[in-house]
Image: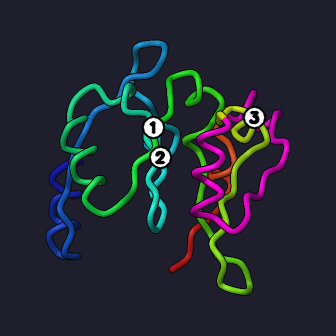
Amino acid sequence: MVELAEKWSERNGYILIPFETKSHTGGAIYHSDVMMYIGTNLAVVCKDSIANGKNEVIESLGKTHQLMFITDSQLLDFCGNCIEVKDNENRLCLIMSSKAVAGYDNDQMKTLNEFYDRIIHSDLTTIENHGGGSARCMIMELY
């Protein structure tokens, strides 16, 4: 799988930074969108969930983004499962669940509000408890 990602990265002008994750149960995290999201100017990362390649991920993201770190407990609140979108007026918005909003502390919410014109959230308890994902997992990205 890494070979395919390397080919794609090379052909599209990206540098691949492979890394491994670990969850609160000790196993790998099934999708990186659970433990981080990368917006236009802000990247939110649960660095404690990166088992191998942590320094490379943090260093690379830090070159182009302001970094905000979340804890393992915030990961379980789906604080890493957010997605940046633009509204009809081209303003940056951040979509997340209500559980994620409640999981961020006041300083983190202040940071998010500095980067986003609006934070959009909804109660996704059923999906989060039974579906294994949250807001970002429910949105298809088109470019």
Q: How many marks?
A: 3
Measured from the top left, where is residue 95 in percent x and y?
A: 69, 57
Residue sitting nearer the eye, 60 or 12? 60
Instruction: Reply above or below: 36 against 49.
Output: below
| Rendering quarter of residue 102 | top right
- Magenta span main SS: helix
Which numbered dot is residue 69? 1
- Comes first in the chain, label 3 or label 1: 1
Few, some or many C-alpha atoms within 10 Å of disc 2 (few <14, some 14-19, many ≥20)? many
Gap between marks 3 and 1, in whole Å? Answer: 16 Å
Whether residue 91 appears in magenta in the rendering, the answer is no
Gap between marks 3 and 2, in whole Å? Answer: 16 Å
Q: In this figure, which residue is indicated by the disc labeled 2?
A: 44
Measured from the top left, where is residue 97 in percent x and y?
A: 74, 44
Mark 3: secondary structure: helix
Mark 2: secondary structure: strand
Q: Which residues are magenta?
A: 106-131
Residue sitting nearer the eye, 142 or 97? 97
Mark 1: secondary structure: strand
Residue sitting nearer the eye, 74 or 27? 74
Which numbered dot is residue 102? 3
Q: Amino acid at mark 3?
A: Ala
Instruction: Reply above or below: 102 against 138.
Output: above
Q: Amino acid at mark 2?
A: Val
Residue drawn where x is 19% and y is 48% of the image: 2
Residue drawn where x is 47% and y is 38% of the image: 35
